[in-house]
Amino acid sequence: MSSVNQATVEYPQATRDDTADTLHGERVADPYRYLEDPDADRTVAFVTAQNAVSQPYLDALPTAGYFRRLLTHLLDRPHAGAPWERGGRYFRLQKPAGANQHRLLAGNTLPELISTPRVLLDPNELADDGSVSIADVGISPDGRFAAVALSESGSDWRRIVVLDADNGARVDVELQWTKWVGPTWLPDSSGLVYWRYPEPQTDGHGEFVVEMPPGALTLHRLGTDQDQDISIWSAAKDLPETAAARADGPEWLVQPQFSDDGRYLMLTAGPGTDSRTLVQIVPVSDDPAAPFGAVRTVIGELTDTYWPVEIVGEQLFLTTKAGAERGRLVRLNLADSDSNTDGTAAHTDGTDGAAGPQLVEVIGEHPEDVLTEVAACAAGWLAVYSHDTAHRIDLVPRLDSAAGSDGAARVDGTAGSDGTAGVDSTGALDGGGQAPQPIPAPNFSSLSGLHSRLSSDEVFLEWSSFTDPGSCYRVAADAPEKPEPLPDNDSGREGQARGTTAQGGSVRSGSVPAVDVVIERRTGVSADGTPVPMTVVRRSGLPDGPRPTLLYGYGGFDIAVVPEYRAMFDAWVRAGGVLVVANLRGGGEFGQSWHEAGMLEHKQRVFDDLYGCAEALIADGTTTAAQLAVHGRSNGGLLAGAALVQRPDLWAAALPTVGVLDMLRFHLFTIGRAWTTEYGNPDDPQQFPALRAYSPLHNTVEGASYPATLITTGDHDDRVVPAHSLKFGAQLQYSQGGDAPVLLRIDTKAGHGAGKSMQALAAEYADQLAFAAAHTGLNPESSDQPG
């Protein structure tokens, strides 16, 4: 159902050459491989020519002006994230109305932070076009310094600057060539650790595409030059023998975290995006010449997910999915044994033995809800659960929490879901059997920010939903049932726990008028009979009958798609469209098996899940194939690309964005090799056939009729390099046998998405929604109008 003239697009000529590889006995053509070099003259000319076709087309769409006004209106609003405290001072990230980026604020007290904060760093002043953003912040334990990781043009590369928390003045050298790991301060605030790579040897070109070498966790002392920094962990040196065979790859990373008392550095190590992890601890010394002791492995087998939460006394608390499909909290007594320095795993079955300390369950597995995170505070454990994708939090008291005991009480995972204690005979809760206490939360929302510390009785939360950009709260440990709404700095408005369920309700939107929406959970059926949940969001009061619908999915990397705010979703719903967010296998919504069922050789199930949702929406009258658009980003861009190639009959429009679309060469660029644990390795003859079978680039059919397609990428995307989209776009334009347009929209000075300026986001989302509206028949002029 298109309202535009589809036959007017003339594509730029893209040269096809005879480049080909023989992979495991099969000749695979790659006629646009020259587009893999982003700096080559032919690539620059291709990008320029494609934008010269796509941008006038997009500008002329009937709803282009409407969506640009609406998206600017939505993104222009002020936003303030959840505060956090260090050294008695308070900090938060806040975007003023009309600004492109968030800035870093500080206050000596929480009221000062809210009412009269000082600005430590405003990236809006570093680039007129808003292309510099704050990627991460680490505050020193004494509250005196702020280490801020800055990103330029959306690149994953970061540079770290250290600021005086009194006045924002720079107090140290700038640290270069870092990614992935936020700056993490030493307990004495004398320096920090960060993840460092060698400087790319590319003569100033190619740092956005070359494969990453191994990196190292590195110690930097304030007042010293970066070339004096010391590597304190690398895969080649510090992995246990059980993982040594895999230690030569560049994909290993560690996430560092110091215990609240400063005695230990906890390290979570894993290869790339593999959700399975190892856990190591390192004693911390007061000796400046030798700040760290020997690395000790406590979880040495790469078999399950383990994440350290905190060390209390000699008890290491971890979340894990070992023996618990939906997760649990366990503890490990570090004093029990020192014998597991050889990499053997701790016991997960509660048995004794020489292989290492035994794990004792503290919070058991819930029968339905997934334990997504546990954080420590002075009153106990903050257990974050996903209940059918919506988040809830229980405050679980620790035994003698003030005295720092081992917290040995075991709490059944059902505790807090219905207000009952759920405690078994292995221990009594602190406070004479006090039950875990639910912290009130908005309806069908997700937790987008949580800040707490073991030694603090303050907890700060931020909630958001599909159509609510966020509300912040302070929770006092002695009154968790009464969250205190915190106002935004810019407008003084307070967060309000207002949302909607299937019964409907009003969504708070700050200075933007509220919109009444109805939210429903429905189910599609995949090709193998698996039920696939999805959320359907629409404005209240819309007339019955099929409507233009945007179907979004991700389905990968154990990442849960939750009800979080995206201005693009909000705008589509306000315009009168139906939004559907599918929870596909491969994601982390429903436990470990749900993820594993959609990875490696099972990836096709993810696409089949999507088709099951689309067919259910058509069958129940929500929409028709002529009114249905599919959208996804990154791994979701692969989903959208595969969907339009495999099932072109299901879609009126497709919006693959920064997608992984060449499944035979993804591992050769930047961090792509890290994804082989999720997708498989094209160099492996056993894994190649599955990748070849669904790779969007390699499965287009010349002369086939494909739906209207808008492929979006950024020329500075150094995560999913733009070659994926450029090659796929050229191939799809070449193959298209129908009248529907195939357009490439390449954003210059933009990366994978994070850190993109408000203006750039508004332009991108508006172009995508105007394109989807034109080809699904959405007419927002009869719906909500931007204010």
Image (cartoon, rainbow, N blue to C red):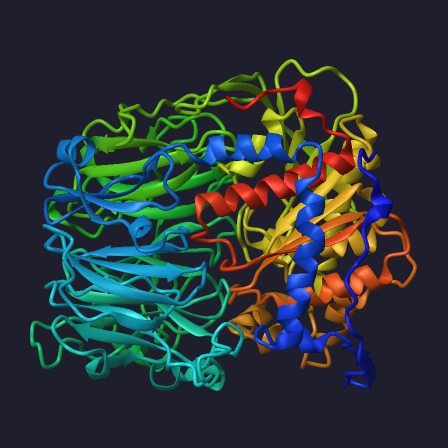
Q: Quadrant of residue 770?
A: top right
Q: Is residue 412 visible?
A: no
Q: Is residue 299 left or right of residue 745?
A: left
Residue displayed at 53% across by 63% down: 717
Residue 474 locus on image (x, y percent): 25, 32
Residue 247 locus on image (x, y percent): 45, 83
In depth, the one of 681 and 368 nearer the eye is: 681
Quadrant in which the N terminus appears: top right
User: Looking at the image, is 247 positioned above or below residue 84?
Assistant: below
In depth, the one of 330 and 151 nearer the eye is: 151
Residue displayed at 18% across by 55% down: 260
In depth, the one of 546 and 43 nearer the eye is: 43
In depth, the one of 596 and 761 nearer the eye is: 761
Residue displayed at 16% across by 61% down: 170
Residue 92 locus on image (x, y percent): 25, 43
Q: Quadrant of residue 603?
A: bottom right
Q: Is residue 525 left or right of residue 724?
A: right
Q: How many marks?
A: 0
Q: Quadrant of residue 605?
A: bottom right
Q: Is residue 179 visible?
A: yes
Q: Is residue 206 left or right of residue 56?
A: left
Residue 365 locus on image (x, y percent): 45, 45
